[in-house]
Each structure stands twice: as structure tokens, then as C-alpha cells.
């Protein structure tokens, strides 16, 4: 029994060390999100008082993760995953990390606040990572109505340029379809304004935001600048996102033309999204019924 326990501990140590080595070599996030996140955490929580992370749409917990590196460093927190198979992998990824929980749950705007409460997430926790490829806007809106995470990294629909505001409606039966998911960076900018958050950066399809009262000398960006620096102006954009080829025309259109293009492109989803232009009070395209 003692030898068996020792073999288990040895394998456990090897597993954790391999994970740490992988992080040191290349990290876990898709692009450069981990490094950027670490930098923002250092600026916005220099005393390390809010080392709790929440990952909504955590996947298997490792591949493409914005939070696994934090958990390896001793952060506490919880990851939510709706898919049963990925949730089992998530549980395996977290099982040896003290203070880190895995929860199989389909997170919605209606239940997200309750779920965070069930896992004793503090109101001003450190990091929220949000990537559910659906009604992300409404989940984030619900979280920011009750919590004040110090840094949020949220996937946007990078294909839709500002000043076009696009967001899918909350639909419990939503299923991901070609380009039809999430929300645009102009819609994120609008959400930030309502909750007194600031847009810090865009890294391809992941945007970083933080409470305005914590910024200090950290500069905030408008949606146009963040989009140009983080996506449209990147020389490797088409190589990294080859499936966006049928949306490339948007980058040579006027805002009105872009809205008309999207309204036609998403015609089969009529009534299931909102489409408009920043600075205009009413949608110019198909509105949520």
C-alpha cells in the first residue's frame, strides 16, 4: 500500500512538473493572452490581494486556457464547462490543484451570478475569462452587474469591425453556426461604458477590460484603436484566421455598408441578434424581438 501511494505521488509530481515545463516553453493560451494577462494583473493588483480566477467556457482546462497558468501559480478559483466530455477532462486537469474547482454547467445570464455565489467567488475577484461562443455579451453584462473582477479577458466576434455593434440574443437553445456568435468590439465598448470599465487591448479575438477606478496611468483605448492594433492591422491576421475570408470585405466598407452586408449575411438568423452603429440610438439591422 505504501509503495502504491508513493508511485501515485511520483506520477502526480511528474504530471505537475510537465505542465509547468509546458507553460515555461509556450504557455497554454491560443496567442499571447497569458503574458498580457500576467502584466495586467501585476498592474491592477500589485499586492496580490485578489488571486481568484473564474473561467467560463473552460474547455478541458489546459488547451487554449487563459487561467491554467494562474492556477499552477497557486491561484484559487473555478472553471465552468457545459460539454460533458470536456468537463470530465477539466476535472482531471484541476484535480491536483488546491483550491481550484471544476463544474459542469451551462452558464447563462440567468444563472451565472448564482453559480459564482455557490462557489464563494468574492465580489472583486482577480480574473474572469469568458469564452462560450454564444451569448457572451449577456453573461458578461450579468456578471458586471453584481461583481467587479479586476481583469476580464473575453472573446469577441473579431470579424465585425467598429463602429458596427453586433450581438446575438440570449437563447437557451443557441447553437454555434458559421460566424454567428458572440458580440463585436463596439458592443463591448458600449457594455464597458455602462459598467464603468475600460478597454485595455485586443489580442486578435480576445479583449481585455478592467474597472476604470483601478487604471491609474494604464491607458484605455477606444474600440477603433484597439481593433486596429489587435486585429485588422496585424499582418498575420489572414493566416491565423483563414476561415474569416468571407468576411474580409467588411474592412473596405463604410459602416453603413458593413451593417447592410451583415444583415444580408445573417438573414437566416433574423430576430435573433441586434445590429447597429455606435452612436446611433436604434438598430439599423435585424433586432431582437
Image (cartoon, rainbow, N blue to C red):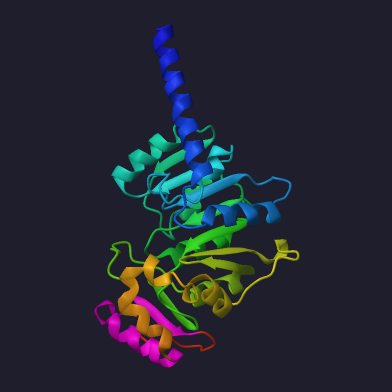
Query: Which image quarter: residue 210?
Result: bottom right
Is-magenta flag for residue 257?
yes
Query: Is 67 left or right of 182, judged from the image as shown?
Result: right
Report the number of discs.
0
In the depicted structure, whether residue 99 falls above or below residue 148? above
Query: Which image quarter: residue 214?
Result: bottom right
The percent position of residue 204, horizontal first and vertical second, equals: 47, 67
Question: Does any portion of residue 284 appear in the rendered image?
Answer: no
Residue at coordinates 69% horizontally, 69% vertically from top-left? 219
The percent position of residue 267, horizontal first and vertical second, equals: 26, 82
Question: Does any portion of residue 113 appear in the rendered image?
Answer: yes
Query: Is 217 left or right of 29, judged from the image as shown?
Result: right
From the image, which quarter does the N terminus lie in?
A: top left
Query: Which image quarter: residue 263?
Result: bottom left
Give the magenta range. Answer: 254-277
Give the residue at the far left of this rendering: 268
The percent position of residue 189, horizontal first and vertical second, equals: 55, 74
Residue at coordinates 45% horizontally, 74% vertically from top-left? 184
Residue at coordinates 39% horizontally, 35% vertically from top-left? 92
The percent position of residue 283, horizontal first and vertical second, equals: 43, 86
Nearer-the-camera pick, 23 or 132: 23
In the depicted structure, whether residue 156 falls above or below residue 83? below
Is-magenta flag for residue 55?
no
In the depicted structure, whether residue 273 falls above or below residue 102? below
From the image, which quarter does the C terminus lie in?
A: bottom left
Amino acid at each position: 500500500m505504501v509503495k502504491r501511494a508513493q508511485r501515485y505521488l511520483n506520477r502526480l509530481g511528474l504530471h505537475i512538473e510537465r505542465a509547468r515545463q509546458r507553460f515555461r516553453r509556450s504557455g497554454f493560451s491560443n496567442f499571447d493572452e497569458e503574458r498580457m494577462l500576467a502584466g495586467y494583473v501585476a498592474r491592477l493588483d500589485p499586492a496580490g490581494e485578489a488571486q481568484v480566477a473564474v473561467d467560463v467556457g473552460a474547455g478541458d482546462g489546459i488547451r487554449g486556457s487563459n487561467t491554467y497558468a494562474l492556477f499552477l501559480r497557486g491561484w484559487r478559483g473555478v472553471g465552468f464547462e457545459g460539454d460533458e466530455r470536456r468537463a470530465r477532462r477539466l476535472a482531471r486537469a484541476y484535480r491536483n490543484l488546491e483550491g481550484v474547482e471544476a463544474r459542469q454547467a451551462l452558464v447563462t445570464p440567468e444563472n451565472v451570478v448564482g453559480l459564482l455565489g455557490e462557489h464563494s467567488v468574492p465580489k472583486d475577484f482577480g480574473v474572469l475569462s469568458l469564452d462560450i461562443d454564444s451569448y457572451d455579451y449577456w453573461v458578461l453584462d450579468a456578471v458586471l452587474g453584481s461583481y467587479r473582477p479586476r481583469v476580464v479577458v473575453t472573446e469577441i466576434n473579431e470579424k465585425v469591425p467598429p463602429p458596427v455593434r453586433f450581438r446575438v440574443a440570449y437563447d437557451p437553445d443557441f447553437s454555434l453556426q458559421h460566424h454567428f456568435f458572440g458580440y463585436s468590439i463596439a458592443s463591448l465598448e458600449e457594455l464597458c461604458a455602462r459598467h464603468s470599465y475600460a478597454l485595455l487591448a485586443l489580442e486578435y479575438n480576445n479583449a481585455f477590460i478592467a474597472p476604470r477606478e483601478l487604471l491609474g496611468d494604464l491607458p484605455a483605448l477606444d474600440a477603433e484603436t484597439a481593433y486596429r492594433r489587435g486585429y485588422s492591422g496585424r499582418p498575420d491576421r489572414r493566416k491565423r484566421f483563414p476561415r474569416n475570408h468571407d468576411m474580409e470585405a467588411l474592412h473596405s466598407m463604410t459602416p453603413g455598408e458593413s451593417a447592410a452586408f451583415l444583415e444580408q449575411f445573417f438573414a437566416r438568423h433574423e430576430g435573433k441578434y441586434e445590429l447597429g452603429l455606435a452612436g446611433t440610438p436604434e438598430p439599423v439591422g435585424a433586432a431582437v424581438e
